[in-house]
Image (tube, coloured by chain):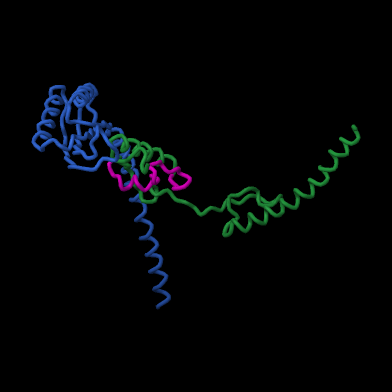
Chain colours: A green, B blue
Amino acid sequence: MADENITLKDAPSDTAAPVARVTGGGYQRRDGARAGSAPGSGAAGSRGEPRKFFRRKKVCKFCVEKIDVINYKDTRLLQQFVAERGKIVPRRLTGVCTPHQKRLTNAIKQARNIALLPFAARF
Amino acid sequence: MQRTYEIMFIVRPDIAEEDVDKLISGFENSLSTAGGTLKSVDKMGKRRLAYLVRKFSEGQYVLLTVQATGKAIHELERRMRVSEPVIKFITVRTDQEQKRIAKVKALRATKVRRVPEQPAAVTEGAVQAENPATA
């Protein structure tokens, strides 16, 4: 009975290894097709190749236009960084740099407190 | 130490204009007795609120720019909290922010002065190069 257990254990391991390789290759091909234009920031492309992070460069809107003051009063500017449901959009989506994102967040929270922006919209 | 503050508050929409003015002058009085000055008043008019405040969906916004001490602001806020027409207010300190902006602008001014020198040199070089070519 012990022998049977050992053999059983051995068998799946033998079949598992080639299966993994096949599906691994398939996944890689699928990733390549999905990424399309860029190697993208997906998982390690193929084993051995260095990762390439090729996302199109996002610039901070405030740094480019040299906007110094992010006031809680200008709702039009703030609404560009607020999602549909009223949530603040993370900076990896908008490309804002960290100090500006901090000021933006504070301004949005101040605007919410004075009813210029909603806390949660679209029930 | 006089600090600059921006106070924005919302007045109920069913209050008349003169009453709003009376309210503002009342605040001004309390401010001056505590030793502050009202720099500017900006009545932003009726606006739709982003959410219901005390069952109102509209309100009259007023913005005050004030230079006062912390204690005077404390007293002013207490009055606003007690007064019936005011439904919401927010006080923001602005003097630190303005100091920072002034610093940034000054820095930018020094940077800009350096740039115009270079294009002049470049154009001179280009002109000199062209002349011997044409001659």
In the image, is A53 to the left or to the right of A121?
right
In the image, is B33 to the left or to the right of B6?
left
Residue at x 11% of width, y 26% of height: B29
Residue at x 16% of width, y 40% of height: B43
Q: Where is residue B45 in the image (x, y as percent from the top left)?
A: 17, 42
Q: Where is residue A4 in the image (x, y as percent from the top left)?
A: 89, 36
- Looking at the rendered structure, the number of numbered marks drawn on it comes to 0
Residue interval drawn in magenta:
A73-96
Quarter of the image that includes the C terminus of chain A? top left
Q: Position of residue B109 (x, y in %)?
A: 32, 47
Residue at x 39% of width, y 73% of height: B131
**Prevailing secondary structure class for the magenta stretch in the rendered image:** loop
Is A117 covered by the magenta stretch? no
Q: Where is residue A71 in the image (x, y as percent from the top left)?
A: 30, 41
Residue at x 75% of width, y 48% of height: A20
Q: Considering only vertical position in the picture, is B8 above or below A45?
A: above
Q: Which image quadrant is residue B87 in?
A: top left
Q: Nearer the viewer, residue A43 or A1?
A: A1
Q: Residue furthest front?
A: A1
Q: Considering only vertical position in the picture, is A33 above or below B59?
A: below
Q: Residue furthest left?
A: B18
Quarter of the image that includes the N terminus of chain A? top right
Q: Which image quadrant is residue A107 in?
A: top left
In the image, is B135 to the left or to the right of B105?
right
Q: Which image quadrant is residue A30 in?
A: bottom right
In the image, is B72 to the left or to the right of A109?
left
Q: Which of A81 and A87 is in front in this view?
A: A87
